[in-house]
Amino acid sequence: MKAPHETNCLVVDDSAVIRKVARRIIEDLGMNVSEAEDGNAALEACAAHMPDAILLDWNMPNMDGYAFLQALRRSEGGEVPKVLFCTTENDIGAIARALRAGADEYIMKPFDRDILTAKLEQVGLVADAA
Amino acid sequence: MTELEFEFLRGFLKQRSGLALTAEKRYLVESRLTPICRRYGLGSLGELIGALKLGRVAAMERDVVEAMTTNETFFFRDRIPFDLFRDTLLPEALLRNASRRRLRIWCAASSTGQEPYSLAMLLQEAAPRMAGWQVEIVATDLSTEVIEKAKAGIYSHFEVQRGLPVQWLIKYFTQVGEQWQIAQSLRSMVDYRQLNLLHSFATLGQFDIIYCRNVLIYFDAPTKSDVLARLAAQLAPEGALLLGAAETVIGLTDRLAPHPKHRGLYAHAAPAARLGETAAIPPLRVAASV
């Protein structure tokens, strides 16, 4: 596991508020955070510098989270980031679809600090409190 | 609340539940007992204490005790006790009990059910290695209210996201409106019973593995010693006891001893060193698949 200050997390969400909340939580864990407001911008960010983790919204303009995830996993090095889908699409079908597309975890909105931290622990990006 | 009233409440809680209400926890009294006052139409905490002193309303006494106990829990809490179960305790028990093919587990402060259901999921994952085994998870708690919630097995989206891998959410839960209910097959694995840890455990029988985590911290030393001695009496000769990270047997009982390698794991004083050292047992690897 990388040290937190060596871990880069990309937050992809069209809501500036959600990006700000997620940034604060993830930065408090010691990680570096960058932001993108849709799938296209996220793909560009990944091409420039592949992150270790991506917190990904589903419904976004231009390219949605699902399309982004499929494109990411097909791209060179795109298998590396741990992807946490983070969305209001909270039904079991949407979750299964996200996992099939290559998501590592799924966060149902609204989320809080405990949940986001726990999910980052589960994908091995944060040292377990235990 | 006057000093005398607080002292009465301390004694009442100690006697009924073992809960040691320290002066630092005094702030909890108002927030937790004000709803009880409203429920019984009482105007103040003083009136509630007065009613408790009369001792005429058993339901009120039970509600006060339950309101003052802490039910914080989540799936796979602290992770290590569950890794230990999957990789060491279960394989060893399967080997040790192979002739009688029976395994008994007790979650001694099961709260709203996340701990016994976490174990039930691990057992379900190990099912191919346990054909023909009789497995019993007994889950007890002081509070009838949390037992009812545990039996229903219905959790909010906050509760299912704390500690539970999403693959297991969709494998073992169904969506009920905005909430999630654990599968009937897992609910039927757990036998919930109301039990006060201050009372006798004799009717429960003997267990191979006991989880009693994050409850002794609320007791004073003599109560901890008493509960630990009685837990030891229910523990099979080579059984395993798991306590919370902030709990220990040291200085409290000589019937149990900590495992030299695994923090939070205890066994009968004599065979403690043998636990977790059975060689050549492949760990049960849990593949979290959809």
Image (cartoon, coloured by chain):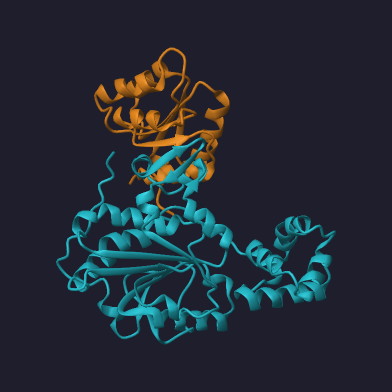
Return the x and y of residue A101 as percentages of the image width and height.
30, 27
Residue at 56%, 30% in the rendered image: A20
Residue at the top extreme, as displayed: A62
Return the x and y of residue A47 as percentages of the image width and height.
32, 21
Residue at 58%, 75% in the rendered image: B219
Q: Depth check: give the residue in front, A43 or B109.
A: B109
Q: Depth check: give the residue in front, B1 or A91.
A: A91
Return the x and y of residue B241 as percentages of the image width and height.
38, 73
Q: Is residue A29 visible?
A: no
Relative to B168, is B88 above or below? Answer: below
Relative to A74, is B245 above or below? Answer: below
Q: Is residue A13 visible?
A: yes
**Direction from residue A58 to residue B40 in the image, left or right:** right
Residue at 31%, 63% in the rendered image: B85
**Direction from residue B194 to residue B16 in the image, left or right:** right
Relative to B290, is B73 above or below? Answer: below
Quarter-wise, where is residue B71 in the image? bottom right
Return the x and y of residue B236 as percentages of the image width and height.
32, 79
Quadrant where the C terminus of chain A sits is bottom left
In the figure, the shade used to draw chain A is orange
In the figure, the shade used to draw chain B is cyan
Quarter-wise, where is residue A95 in the image? top left
**Direction from residue B100 to residue B157 in the image, left or right:** right
